[in-house]
Image: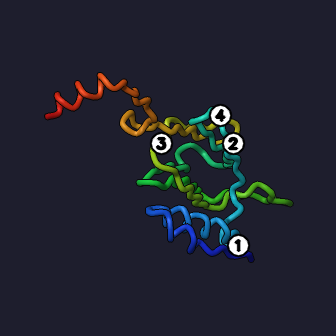
Amino acid sequence: MRTYDFTPLYRSAIGFDRLARLADDALRVDTQPSYPPYDIELVEENAYRIRMVVAGFEQNELDIETERDTLKISGHKATATQGNYLHRGISTQDFERRFQLAEHVKVVSAGLQNGILTVDLIREIPEAMRPRKVLINSGDNVQLLERRAA
């Protein structure tokens, strides 16, 4: 497994330790569960969609929860299916899948149709944090502003 040294980042950037930790965690793919399979789609510039295959699960057996910067999707079968199976390929095991959310990303809706769970997310950046233009004043206007401030 390849490792990366984030020391140069720490020398010149403040507050990016969380980013380095996320990158380190992402490199540890051996601990990531592969069930259930899912897709993450970029729908628009600030809109995302997660589609997860949850065949065999009913709506009341699924749970979607957000806490701070984490989205947790879990499924717990209420009752074990009984039957005389010759082959059992549709997995109905309990699962828990966690996703790290960036700042200002929130879940806006979720739906279940044909065994696919769809979770829509959107990034809403607060007005105070959005980029804004700053007007450049001429020499006369600058003097007026200095007098007002005094």
**Residue for badge 4:** 43
Q: Residue at x 66, y 71 (%)?
A: 28
Q: CA distance from mark 2 to mark 4?
A: 21 Å
**Residue for badge 1:** 30
Residue 109 at x, y percent in the picture: 52, 35
Q: Residue at x 52, y 37 (%)?
A: 122
- Quarter the C terminus occupies: top left
Judge depth for marks 3 and 2 and give the one in front: 3
What kind of residue is marked 1?
A: Asp
Mark number for residue 115? 2
Q: CA distance from mark 1 to mark 3?
A: 28 Å
What kind of residue is marked 2?
A: Gly
**Residue for badge 3:** 106
Q: Residue furthest left?
A: 150
Which element is circle 3 on?
strand
Front in this rendered view, residue 78 or 125: 125
Residue 133 at x, y percent in the picture: 44, 29
* Image quadrant in which you'd find residue 2: bottom right
Q: Residue at x 51, y 50 (%)?
A: 102
